[in-house]
Image (tube, rainbow, N blue to C red):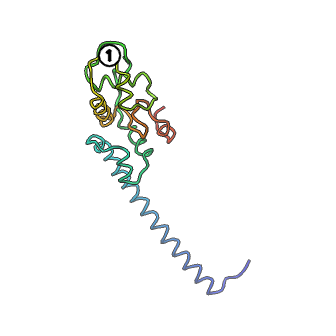
Amino acid sequence: MRRLDSQDLSNRRRIEDELLALGSEREVLQREDGWNRERIRRLVGPAREVGITVRDVSRMTGLSTQTLHTWMVDLMRPIPDIHLELAGPPPASVEQAALRVMGEAPARDWSADAVHRHWPPTWPATSGEQVAAALERLARWHMIWDGPEGYRVEMPAEVRSAGSPLP
C-alpha cells in the first residue's frame, strides 16, 4: 500500500470536503423535489376540475403523464350505473349515457365520435359536441381516464405497470 504524502492528503481532504458538500446539497434538492411533487400532486385534482388536461399539467410541470395518471388513482370515483351498459332504462343524462356506451368496452380508448356512433337510437338524441363535453366533464370529475388516445373507463396499462396499488 502506497503512503500518502502531505500533498496527497491535502488533495484527499479537499475531495472529501467537496463530496460531503455535494452530498448535503443533494439531500436538500431531494427534499425540495419531494415537496415540489407533493404541491403538484395536490393541484392535479383541482386542475382537472377546472378543465386543465393531464397532458397540459405534464407540459407545465415537466412530470410525465404516466406519473400524473398514477397520482389520479387516488382521485378516481366509482361508476355505479356503468354495469347497465346499453340495456336497462334510458340514461338520465348525456354523461350517464356516455358511461354506459363506454361500459361495453371499458379498456378501449374512446373518442367522442366513437361514443356518439355507438349511441342507441332509442336513447334521447344528442350531438357529437354534447358527447365531447360530457366526456371532458367525466374526466374532470375523475370518473374516466383522459389519455393521449382518448377516454377510457379502465385504468390504463401504463398506470397499472407504474406500481399503482389498484389491481
Residue 69 x, y percent position in the rendering = 41, 41
Residue nearest the observer in this picture, 5 or 50? 50
What quarter of the picture does the N terminus occupy? bottom right
Residue 14 x, y percent position in the rendering = 54, 79
Q: Residue at x 39, y 34 (%)?
A: 151
| 17, above or below 110, in the image | below
Can you name the residue that lies furthest to the bottom here?
Answer: 6
Residue nearest the observer in this picture, 37 or 149? 149
Residue nearest the observer in this picture, 86 or 9? 86
| 85, above or below 155, in the image | above
Residue nearest the observer in this picture, 110 or 103? 110
Q: Residue at x 45, y 44 (%)?
A: 66
Give the residue number, with chain letter if any, for mark 1: 121
Q: Residue at x 70, y 82 (%)?
A: 3
To which quarter of the image does residue 144 belong?
top left
Mark 1 secondary-structure assignment: loop
To which quarter of the image does residue 61 belong?
bottom left
- Disc 1 marks a residue whose amino acid type is Pro
